[in-house]
Amino acid sequence: MKFLRCIPLFFGLFVWFYALFSPKGLPEFLKLLIVKKALEEEITELKEQNKLLQEELRKIKNDPLYLEHLARSQLGMIRDGEILIILPSNLP
């Protein structure tokens, strides 16, 4: 009779040891925790980047001077009547 009461205990210990020491047990769990932390850090960085891009988009939509600055500096655009002079960078 005592043997029958010990069977669930032995079964529980077996399952616990198997979960702890099997290749898909604790080592896999620890590896997944590391991956989870890396993904959470990446999410934080992407949220910050998204916030900066949203701010830049707001400036582009609402600030004509900022839009003009971007057009001139990044696209090389000029106003009507202006003359663009490009100086060579290798002057003696």
Image (spheres, grey):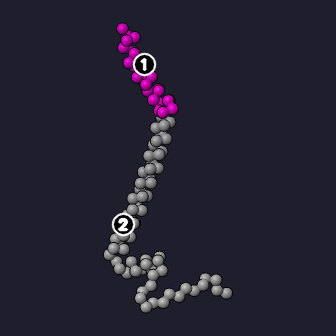
Q: Quadrant of residue 43?
A: bottom left
| Image quarter of the N terminus | top left
Q: Residue furthest left?
A: 62
Q: Quadrant of residue 67?
A: bottom left
Quick one: label 1, few (<14), some, or many (20+) residues within 10 Å? few
Q: Secondary structure at mark 2?
A: helix
Compared to 16, does 27 lie above or below? Answer: below
- Residue 23 highlighted magenta (yes or no): yes
Q: Are marks 1 and 2 in contact (CB under 8 Å)?
A: no
Q: In the image, 17: left or right of 64?
A: right
Image disc number at residue 10 = 1
- The image shows residue 92 at horizontal and vertical percentages of 67, 87
* Residue type indicated by callout 1: Phe
Image disc number at residue 75 = none
- Residue 2 highlighted magenta (yes or no): yes
Which circle's residue, 1 or 2, is located before the other in the chain?
A: 1
**Residue labelled with disc 2:** 54
Query: Residue at the location (36% across, 74% down)?
Result: 60
- The image shows residue 9 at horizontal and vertical percentages of 40, 19
Per the rendered image, the range of residues in magenta is: 1-25
Mark in front: 1 vs 2? 2
The one nearer the camera, 27 or 82, is 82
Compared to 12, does 26 lie above or below? Answer: below
* Residue type indicated by callout 2: Gln
Compared to 5, does 25 lie above or below? Answer: below
- The image shows residue 62 at horizontal and vertical percentages of 32, 75
Query: Residue at the location (38% across, 18% down)?
Result: 8
Query: Residue at the location (44% across, 50% down)?
Result: 39
